[in-house]
Amino acid sequence: MNSQQLQHLYWRAGFGPRPADIAAGLSPAKALRQLLREAESYTPIEGPALHYADPLGAVMAVQPPAPVMAGAAMAAELPLLSPRTGALPAGRPAAPVLRRRDLTPEQRKQQNEGIRDAFAAMSTAWMERMATGPGQLREKMALFWHGHFACRTRRPDDSLQLLNTIRQHALGRFSDLLLAVSREPAMLQFLNNQQNKKEHPNENFAREVMELFTLGRGNYSEADVKEAARAFTGWSYDGQNNFVFRVRQHDDGPKNFLGHIGNLGGEDVLAIIMQQPAAATFLVTKMYRFFVNDVPNPAHIEPLAAAFRRSHYDIADLAERLFSAPWFYDATNVGVRIKSPVELIAGLRRTLGVQVDNVQPLLGYQKALGQTLFMPPNVAGWPGGRNWIDSSSLLLRLQLPAILFKNAEFAVRLKDDENDITPQTTGKERTVRNTVGARLPLAALQQLLGGSSAAEQPRQLAQHLLQVPIRPENLALVQQAAAQATTPEEQLRTTLISLLSLPEYQLS
């Protein structure tokens, strides 16, 4: 029973168990403490060289520049990430560069390709942390917040800075995470708060902070949205990715927000929101859907929400309570969630120790399956659940192990997406072919199997890989495929690929 519970914990609090994790023989309680301890360390994901250069070598601004003084012909340079820390250098002087509207078609194409390649490098770096890194709980929690604080920009440096902010605060206090995210240039730009000025308030940022990030619909009024928008006037950013409060654009008049009256600023609004009991219930419910079950159980939600409020919104404390609750291991919560594309691919790599020569096609498969990191479909994020599965995505999911480990021919034609950075690409350019070069090492699994007979290996591996019992007819098919192999190694490899290709493997 401990082995099954461990697998459940590692899949929900991370990206699946390695054979060594199961062989260690830890109790679920000790494994959870280890996951929490390993997640205490934070290091930023370092940025690639985020240069989007024209033929003359000038770094081109990705977004149209802010209004400039009369006679000024150039916009501020897009800031670059420090190669050492992934952070943005403070006070770095801006260099004049071409505005986007002044670029030639060829220069725009080069710029778009540079942006696309930067996002690909960032996605690859984060997927590497998920698949091989020790801080599984931090990365899994960051993936949850990445969808919760859904944000989409054309500026890779902004997006990476936001991700590192989320990863840094992923297990801290939610109030600190909320404030930090709300001050990120990526979020302020995505939700139009740079346009929120006292003469013409823009309500988009204030509305989404309450509707999607903290309270949920029904727990605030339209009047609260208008007053909160006034409080957030002047929240903006400069050309070096630093938060800036522009006093002249701020409405410093009295406001009435959720029953609190005064000259409220943005920080006051966020603090008042966190005083609302609805905030804890909303957040815990959303986390429950992601980590436990798509169908929330009020009997579990309310005690967790009360504890979350008492802890002053300590996310690590909430995670520990959730993953150590007896009901977390109930059969009704095991093997009932469909793995997201990121969980599926990172989990394949992690649980089997897969070695990959070329990660680029993996990003293409993720996109074909419906989840591209840094590119949520809208401000509400990825819907998840059964939305991950349709006829085309299920076929790819089931054939992915054969594509990766048997070099099966399977060319995926990515759909046209108006939000793509490079939407006008040819069908050939949008086709993903298998050049991954994935290798499936067997030594760790052979050690886990010990002296099991060849006939028993499919059943034993099914218990290790699948979160739901394998159906007898599927087990028979796996055994038949394995029996046709000529060597023990080939038999084990065939068994693995057959099990990974079952519908049951799509569940965690």
Image: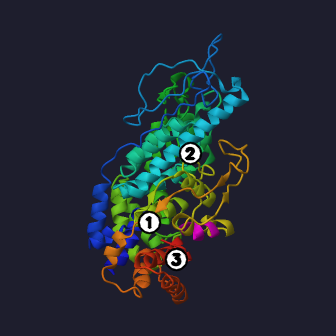
Label 2: which secondary element: loop
Task: Pick whichever of labels 3 and 1 is earlier in the sequence.
Answer: 1
Query: Do labels 2 and 1 touch, CB within 8 Å?
Result: no
| Residue 402 screen position, x and y as percent | 55, 69
| Residue 112 screen position, x and y as percent | 64, 36
Which quadrant holds residue 57?
top right
Question: Dividing the image into 4 quarters, which one contains the N terminus?
Answer: bottom left
Left/right of residue 274 with respect to residue 55 in the rendered view: left
Left/right of residue 253 with respect to residue 487 in the rendered view: right
Q: Amino acid at mark 2?
A: Cys
Q: Is residue 57 above or below residue 34?
A: above
> What colouring style does the render use?
rainbow
Left/right of residue 106 with respect to residue 324 in the rendered view: right
The range drawn in magenta is 395-401
User: Which residue in the rendered view is the most extreme toward the front?
Assistant: 486
Task: Pick whichever of labels 2 and 1 is earlier in the sequence.
Answer: 2
Q: Amino acid at mark 3?
A: Ser
Left/right of residue 298 with respect to residue 70 in the rendered view: left
Residue nearest the viewer, comparing 310 with 10: 10
User: Which residue in the rendered view is the most extreme toward the top?
Assistant: 71
| Residue 281 screen position, x and y as percent | 47, 60
Residue nearest the viewer, comparing 272 with 187: 187
Pair 3/1: label in front: 1
Residue at 55% x, 51% y is 360
Instruction: Name the residue that disc number 2 marks.
Output: 151
